[in-house]
Amino acid sequence: MTAPSSPVYPRSQYGSPSGEGARVPSSPRFPRIEERVLDHWEAAGTFRASVENRPTVTAEGEPNEFVFYDGPPFANGLPHYGHLLTGYVKDLVARYQTQRGHRVERRFGWDTHGLPAELEAMKQLGMRDKAEIEAMGIGTFNDACRASVLKYTHEWQDYVTRQARWVDFENDYKTLNVDYMESVIWAFKQLHEKGLTYQGFRVLPYCWRDETPLSNHELRMDDDVYQERQDPSVTVAFPVTGGGALGDALRGAHLLAWTTTPWTLPTNFSIAVGPDVEYVVVEAPAEGPIPGRHVLATELLGSYAKDLGFSDEVDENGKVTTSAADAALAAVTARYLGTELADLQYEPLWDYYADAERWETGQAFRVLVEEYVTTTDGTGLVHQASAYGEEDQRSSEEAGIPVILSVDAGAKFLPLFAEPTPSGDAPLADIAGVQVFDANRTIINALKTQGRLVREASYLHSYPHCWRCRTPLIYRSITSWYVAVTQFKD
């Protein structure tokens, strides 16, 4: 009996034709063995046979296909260890279903859309921002993207094949193909006709350099995403004009709201208070920076005493007899729970959005009660800008306050701010076209000029940056189309 030949140990090298003396080498060259196995599979058409030998329908007329959707990689970058790990899992699933007798087509795909393709083309063209794309022309830029997206297809094919993974490269698909895009549009149309799609806003981490939102997963891409950053924090006074149960009692008093994002103050549309937080009304000294009554959390009054004009009293020996905090506490004229402050109305910082008919802000510029408010930082009153915070947007939408964006895709303030407001002036004209972080100083100076700035401080915090370009992110409301998965999942 003749020993069968094998792609691993062929008779020509490891034994006589009769099989006598066949042996396993003491030092096998595993890479060469792998190559022989792969060559044997290719020559014999083993993978294609494993598909074609299994019918799409059983003898009983039942469907026999196992559909495997393989998430496509970008071909403008080289494969790495992560692709190796996921590739084995994908191959295992497909082989298992094949062994069960199912027909498993395994078309490989290429993701040619999205930011990676765009950034690679920009890099090759020496571009730094999206304005250069528009200057070049979208069509010309798309041609450059199309030329670069399949740069490493051969390297990918070698890598995947060397894994001993079986996939169909000959009948691959590319997301740039018109028939593929039409199939996606068709699928979305089916969902839309069933009432399962909707357009909405969602606040997401946003890279203004790449002009794209990031997922929560991308905020954990590496240890350098969060970096220490110094930013200004401000406490601002908002005069009460009426409204709510206490509108008459607190008319003229100042609501003191704190924020670490001064650039969002031009779109302040509400102030949030905690329902169970106790707030005090304190009468500030006439010689203080902003005389009159001020509203803030009882627990945080002491930390703001000196900012409101209170000072330590000392005796002839220089010993403090009454601290500024105690002096402020003695000046308290009333105490209220957050729930009692609900619906107080206040004077907006600027009147860019005061035209309620134009901006649908009839429900804006009032106090909202929110569970998320704490007394850990600030004043216990939180400035809310509906387009720039997840809680801000949710709270605003529930209160009938619109989501209004004040910056463009590059996080630069809109030309609106250079236009005269209903009062006839343009107090923030200098921020039009300015990037948000660069506009902070102009906004803070405007608050000082108006007598609204109670405190300015430097705030050191761990701040998220884009993992691609290391640009500091902002949180920005993004309008998009969504699939109402819960309607058919539940």
Image (cartoon, grey):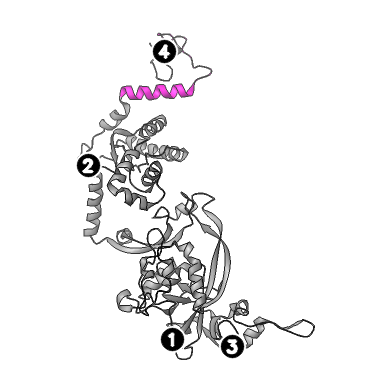
Residue 400 appears in the rendering: yes
Give whichever of 432, 25 is nearer the camera: 432
Query: At x 41% / y 75%, what residue is drawn?
Result: 269
Q: Which residue is mark 3?
A: 286
Q: Identity of the amino acid at label 2? A: Glu
Numbered circle sitting on residue 62: 2
Q: CA distance from mark 2 to mark 4?
A: 44 Å
Residue mark closest to the camera, 1 vs 2: 1
Q: Mark 1 = which residue?
A: 241
The residue singled out by tag 4 in the image is: 11
The answer to whether marks 1 and 2 mark residues whose Cβ atoms lie closer than 8 Å is: no
First-in-chain label (2 vs 3): 2
Q: Nearer the viewer, mark 2 or mark 4?
A: 4
Q: Is residue 217 left or right of residue 176?
A: right
Q: Secondary structure at mark 2?
A: loop
Identify whether 147 is placed above or below 33: below
Under mark 3, the amino acid is Ala
**Residue 467 within the segment the image draws in magenta:** no
| Label 1 SS | strand
Disc 4 marks a residue whose amino acid type is: Arg
**What distance separates the C-alpha of mark 3 from that of mark 1?**
21 Å
